[in-house]
């Protein structure tokens, strides 16, 4: 009787272990989705608030001024982030518009289609990315031209001896010289514009409600997390730019152009009927649908 009992005990124990093993195989998938949803809820609560959209432009301007004053009055010691070859700068900031474009494209498409079910509305809202691309291209070209026409080629970063035979930045660098002109901070401009654009587009999450059974739940949740973390990277690297790079006037102009680009689109043009429009909101969704049909 005793051996049989032990055998039954071991069989029961073995069965319990097997069940636990099978359960543990399913557990990571559930846990991963739960963690993703938890991050999405946290980011929704942080970035989707109207107060964030209202005060983030002022916060960025304050960060720029505070960081610039710190750089001028009490420079921080060099660190990994002060190296232009740091990972965040090389793989994220220098590709800031590409990252923003590639994540906002499916986010705008899925959320707009989920709320309206109209392909025409989706295409119209996606045109915000074409506008953003045009803004990025025009201003980066403008900054480059300003640096070219206000600059000269020097022998070294100490601005010793002008090398007048080199009339362009590319030629100057090619011959081992140092080009010095009014270099408006492209990072301050683009990081400001990208962060504000993402926050504006994420306002649609006030209206988007899905559960796990919905086919768009996982992609939308994943995009919310990705865009949220991207926004924090943009704001953090904006602060690093303010603390470590450029002088005050260059950052003031860069940040100002970023703020004007955001306000000129989301604060003015997108409120008009002939525009890509703002993200759908409950108070204006029906009105926007009617205007889009027209």
Image (spheres, grey):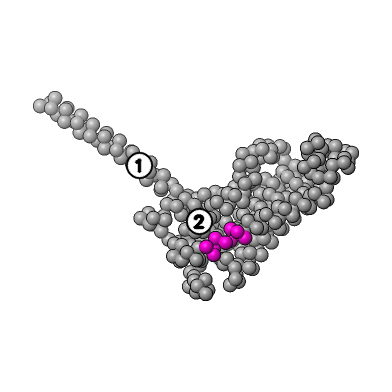
- Above or below for 170 versus 62: above
Disc with the residue nearer the chain's start (2 vs 1)? 1
The secondary structure that dominates the magenta segment is helix
Front one among 86 and 167: 167
Is residue 148 visible in the rendered image? The answer is: yes
**On the picture, is 153 further left or further right than 207?**
right
The span picked out in magenta is 123-131
User: How busy is the neighbourhood of tag 1: few (under 14 within 10 Å), some, or many (20 plus)?
Assistant: few
**On the picture, is 42 further left or further right than 132?**
left
Which residue was labeled with disc 2?
A: 107
Circle number at residue 27: 1
Q: Residue at x 69, y 61 (%)?
A: 260
**On the picture, is 184 further left or further right than 8?**
right
Q: Nearer the viewer, mark 2 or mark 1?
A: 2
Q: Label 2, label 1: how many angstroms apart (C-alpha)?
A: 28 Å
Front one among 141 and 287: 141
Front one among 68 and 146: 146
- Above or below for 219 versus 76: below
User: How busy is the neighbourhood of tag 2: few (under 14 within 10 Å), some, or many (20 plus)?
Assistant: many
Circle number at residue 268: none
Q: Residue at x 54, y 49 (%)?
A: 229
Q: Residue at x 64, y 41 (%)?
A: 90
Is residue 232 visible in the rendered image? The answer is: no
x then y, percent, for residue 110: 47, 58
x then y, percent, for residue 205: 49, 60
Numbered disc 2: secondary structure: helix
Q: Is residue 56 magenta?
A: no
């Amino acid at each position: 009787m005793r051996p049989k009992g032990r055998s039954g005990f071991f069989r029961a124990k073995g069965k319990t272990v097997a069940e636990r093993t099978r359960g543990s195989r399913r557990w990571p998938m559930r846990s991963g989705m739960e963690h993703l949803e938890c991050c999405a809820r946290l980011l929704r609560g942080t970035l989707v608030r109207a107060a964030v959209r209202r005060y983030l432009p002022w916060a960025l301007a304050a960060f720029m001024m505070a960081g610039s004053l710190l750089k001028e009055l009490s420079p921080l010691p060099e660190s990994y982030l002060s190296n232009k070859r740091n990972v965040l700068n090389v793989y994220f900031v220098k590709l800031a518009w590409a990252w923003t474009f590639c994540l906002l494209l499916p986010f705008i498409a899925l959320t707009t289609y989920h709320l309206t079910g109209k392909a025409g509305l989706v295409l119209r809202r996606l045109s915000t990315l074409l506008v953003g691309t045009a803004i990025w291209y025009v201003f980066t070209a403008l900054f480059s031209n300003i640096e070219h026409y206000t600059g000269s080629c020097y022998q070294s970063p100490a601005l010793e001896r002008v090398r007048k035979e080199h009339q362009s930045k590319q030629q100057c660098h090619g011959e081992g010289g140092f080009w010095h002109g009014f270099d408006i901070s492209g990072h301050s401009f683009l990081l400001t514009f990208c962060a504000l654009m993402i926050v504006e587009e994420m306002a649609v999450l006030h209206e988007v409600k899905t559960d796990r059974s919905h086919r768009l739940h996982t992609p939308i949740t994943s995009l919310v997390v990705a865009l949220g973390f991207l926004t924090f990277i943009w704001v953090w690297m904006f602060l690093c730019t303010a603390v470590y790079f450029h002088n005050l006037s260059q950052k003031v102009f860069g940040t100002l152009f970023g703020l004007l680009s955001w306000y000129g689109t989301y604060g003015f043009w997108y409120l008009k009927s002939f525009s890509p429009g703002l993200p759908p909101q409950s108070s204006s969704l029906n009105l926007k649908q009617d205007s889009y049909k027209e």
